[in-house]
Image (cartoon, helix red, strand yellow):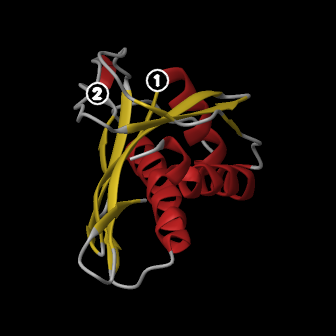
Amino acid sequence: MTADQFDVFAASLRTVFETMLNLPVVVERPSVLDGAAPAFEVRAEVEFSGAATGRAAMLMSADTGRKLAAIFAGAALAPGHRDFDDAIGELAHMVCGGAKGLFGVDGAWISCPSVDSGGGRLALRRRAPGAVRLIGRSECGDIEMEIEVTLASEGGREAAA
């Protein structure tokens, strides 16, 4: 799995944030995760199934989450509140749905997002060897994505997205 194969997530992150929030995002070159990284206070995870399997998680600080949720919902929302979780979850769902659309395969599905805004506690990070990390930089703060998605090819072999 190479970092270059995850351009679809970078493109979707930029598109969703620019379209839905009018917020430009500069995405750094993807990298393969290696070792421990800091925990984040907000985590929204989407599972992939069918022709694409795995997961993608959007992670951020509580401050970044508050700013993004306020722009998206048009109201001040605090981590731990269900409307905050809905706003952040919907952003993650749109980013993953956009990436899924760019895979160019039929029969891939994504789950409803699972959001942990922790109400002040840090969201634990699961790590799998070879997961890819994207960092998006915005005026509201950094958004990190952890991606572990594999596409099944027509011949039954698997290739990383």
Q: Residue at x 39, y 30 (%)?
A: 42
Observer-nearest of 11 and 76: 11
Instruction: Give me the C-alpha separation between circle 2 and circle 1.
Output: 9 Å
Q: Are marks 2 and 1 in contact (CB under 8 Å)?
A: yes
Q: Residue 18 in the image: x percent, y percent? A: 74, 52
SS at badge 2: helix
Observer-nearest of 85 and 52: 52
Dividing the image into 4 quarters, which one contains the C terminus? bottom left
* Residue position marked by numbered label 1 in the rendering: 62
Dividing the picture into quadrants, the one containing residue 110 is: bottom left
Dividing the picture into quadrants, the one containing residue 30 is: top right
- Mark number for residue 33? none
Three-letter code for the amino acid on which mark 1 is drawn = Ala
Q: Residue 94 in the image: x percent, y percent? A: 51, 61
Taking 101 as reference, is 74 above or below it? above
* Residue position marked by numbered label 2 in the rendering: 118
